[in-house]
Image: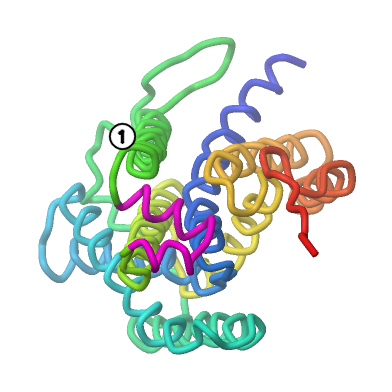
């Protein structure tokens, strides 16, 4: 029993930390401007394709291509905010939500036009050979350097994000906007600049998640952001929408539930088991695992 449980937990944690990276982008944007950015999954997808393009067309090394893709996706996130969301700051929330869905569809189709609609393999020749080698073996579990690399990158990025939010001026401004945008503007905070920085940070983290998934599964395709985006949104809701630590925890819980569902129930029901866990948490704790209940004042 234990021999089957441990490999599933490792697979679930690997998937969960990636979901957490994507979910953080959702929850940051929602926390600042109360918008569900459904185009975030497509930024995740573009990160993978841009990384491959930098490797094949420009000849960049693997690690440099990751950094370049992060930078490009950060700019794409800022551009999305400038073009699609900034003009709708004072519009009803439904208008911004419909715009986000429209941008998601547009980016999917743009990727199909540029890279084609069929799944592509990652450029495995560019990936350092040692990442595919076994790093650790314990209790019948084989951990590759790639899995350790995924754990290391995601953990470092999430800790770095927490430091940015809690220890920097831009992080303080983000938290001020999350509390009260009007008061923050009256205190001299450049609201549009802070929102743009929020999109940039979330998009960069989403790009890294897309690259890690495409390397891990050796596959990337234009619609890969849809399923991942929905699951990451579910992870953000599970952890408590608007809470960065909650999004991290929600992603890990969702990944582990999905892996255990595939291992002990059936791979056909892995998504169902994960969402059943999310629904159960929302029923018994509507604000999510780490979210705070919001009290409407009359």
Image-quadrant location for residue 199: bottom left
Q: Quadrant of the C terminus?
A: bottom right
Image-quadrant location for residue 144: top left
Q: How many marks?
A: 1
**Residue 38, x across and y down, in percent:** 56, 72
Q: Residue at x 57, y 33 (%)?
A: 13
Most foreground residue, 251 or 141: 251
Let me know if residue 121 appears in the view.
Answer: no
Q: Residue at x 89, y 48 (%)?
A: 283
Where is mark 1, residue-wise? 131
Most foreground residue, 151 or 245: 245
Range of magenta residues: 170-187
Q: How many residues crowd around disc 1 within 10 Å: few (fewer than 14), some, or many (20 or more)? A: some
State yes or no: residue 51 in magenta: no
Most foreground residue, 288 or 64: 288
Image-quadrant location for residue 45: bottom left
Relative height, residue 108 to residue 1 (above, below): below
**Residue 110, x across and y down, in percent:** 40, 86
Q: Residue at x 64, y 42 (%)?
A: 250
Q: Is residue 89 left or right of residue 34?
A: left
Relative height, residue 107 to residue 12 (above, below): below
Q: Secondary structure at mark 1?
A: helix
Its colouring scheme is rainbow
Q: Quadrant of the N terminus?
A: top right
Most foreground residue, 220 or 152: 152
Let me know if residue 110 appears in the view.
Answer: yes
Q: Is residue 22 left or right of residue 202?
A: right
């Amino acid at each position: 029993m234990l021999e089957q449980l441990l490999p599933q937990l490792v697979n679930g944690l690997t998937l969960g930390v990636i979901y957490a990276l994507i979910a953080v982008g959702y929850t940051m944007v929602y926390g600042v401007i109360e918008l569900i950015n459904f185009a975030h999954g497509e930024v995740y997808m573009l990160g993978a394709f841009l990384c491959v393009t930098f490797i094949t067309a420009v000849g960049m090394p693997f690690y440099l291509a990751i950094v370049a893709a992060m930078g490009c996706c950060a700019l794409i996130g800022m551009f999305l905010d400038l073009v699609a969301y900034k003009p709708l700051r004072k519009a009803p929330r439904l208008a911004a939500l419909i715009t986000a869905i429209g941008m998601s569809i547009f980016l999917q189709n743009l990727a199909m036009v540029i890279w084609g609609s069929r799944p592509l393999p990652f450029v495995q020749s560019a990936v350092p050979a040692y990442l595919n080698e076994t790093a650790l073996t314990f209790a019948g579990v084989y951990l590759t350097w790639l899995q350790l690399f995924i754990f290391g990158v995601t953990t470092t990025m999430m800790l770095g994000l927490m430091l940015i939010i809690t220890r920097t001026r831009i992080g303080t401004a983000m938290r001020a906007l999350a509390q009260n945008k009007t008061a923050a503007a009256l205190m001299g905070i450049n609201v549009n600049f802070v929102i743009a920085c929020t999109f940039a940070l979330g998009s960069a983290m989403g790009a890294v998640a897309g690259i890690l998934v495409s390397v891990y599964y050796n596959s990337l395709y234009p619609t890969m952001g849809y399923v991942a985006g929905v699951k990451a949104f579910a992870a953000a809701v599970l952890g408590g929408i608007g809470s960065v630590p909650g999004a991290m925890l929600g992603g890990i819980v969702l990944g582990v539930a999905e892996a255990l569902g595939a291992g002990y129930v059936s791979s056909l029901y892995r998504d169902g088991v994960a969402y059943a866990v999310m629904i159960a948490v929302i029923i018994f704790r509507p604000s999510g695992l780490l979210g705070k209940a919001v009290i409407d004042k009359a």
